[in-house]
Amino acid sequence: IMNSTGSDLKSTYIYGDLGYGTGAVANTSNVQGNISAITPATFPAVTDPTWTPTNPGVTTITSSQTLYGGTKAAPARYKVSSVNIPAGKILTLDTPTSGQQAYIEIWVTGNFTTSGSGYIKQMPGVNVTYYIDGDITVSGSSFQNQSNTASSCTVYGVTPPTGSSAHTVTVSGGGNFIGVINAPSCNFNISCSANFSGALVGNTMIISGGASVHFDEALNHNSSGTNFSVASWYDDIN
């Protein structure tokens, strides 16, 4: 957590370590790992990608449909104004050839929402990266990452322009998420019976109800993402 002022775990279980910046986090009695104050380096702003979509015909995602991935060298790229998966709808991310790895990048210039019985079904072998300019709301049935590996699903919360309000990341209800969320400017709220497995970077954090957060140790071997590091120090020798 970058700025722990206003962060409250409300005695929710965190299966992993907790490092925080300025000010202690409230109600950390059920953190299963180590709790420590750290001096983080300044996190770089998350910026929009610069690529051109390979599928310009897809401009919004609001109903059931299937998007197919490409190769690692040439991923399928979609730029849409919003993603809103309501009750009864399914966004399926699939491989063009069963048994092979596929890669998809989705740039959302607005908000990203799943709700009710609507969800995103990420088929085995699919690796997806999201860039989201607006708020992220994951509720209801949420995600089905059928690879069950956090490294196969990465969400970047794009830093808003200077002077703009901070964006939010909300994981609520029975929503489950397996993946990585890198959104250093966003305020997180994980509540009810929501389950988060993977890793996350945010500005502030509120976790309540029966929600749980599990750090996937396999991500220690992943070269992507951002680590905390010491910004400065001095030697005190007497």
Image (cartoon, rainbow, N blue to C red):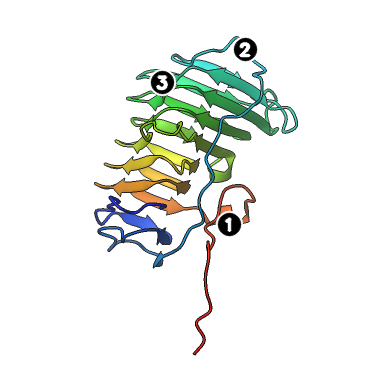
Looking at the picture, tell me which residue is in the foreground, 180 or 148: 180
**Along the horizontal axis of the image, is 84 left or right of 94?**
left
Helix, strand or loop at label 1? It is helix
Q: Position of residue 237 (x, y in %)?
A: 52, 86
Q: Position of residue 133 (x, y in %)?
A: 47, 28
Q: CA distance from mark 3 to mark 2?
A: 20 Å
> Which disc is residue 85 wearing?
3
> Which disc is residue 220 wearing?
1
In front: mark 1 or mark 2? 2
Q: Is residue 37 above or below residue 143?
A: below
Asked whether the beta carbons under mark 3 and mark 1 sit within 8 Å of each other, the answer is no
Identify the amino acid type marked 3. Answer: Ile
**How many neighbours does mark 1 have within 10 angstroms: few (below 14), some (14-19), or many (20 or more)?**
few
Q: Position of residue 107 (x, y in %)?
A: 55, 25
> Which disc is residue 100 wearing?
none
Q: CA distance from mark 3 to mark 1?
A: 32 Å
Identify the amino acid type marked 2. Answer: Pro
Looking at the picture, tell me which residue is in the foreground, 6 or 200: 6
**Along the horizontal axis of the image, is 39 left or right of 129?**
left
Q: Is residue 168 above or below residue 37?
A: above
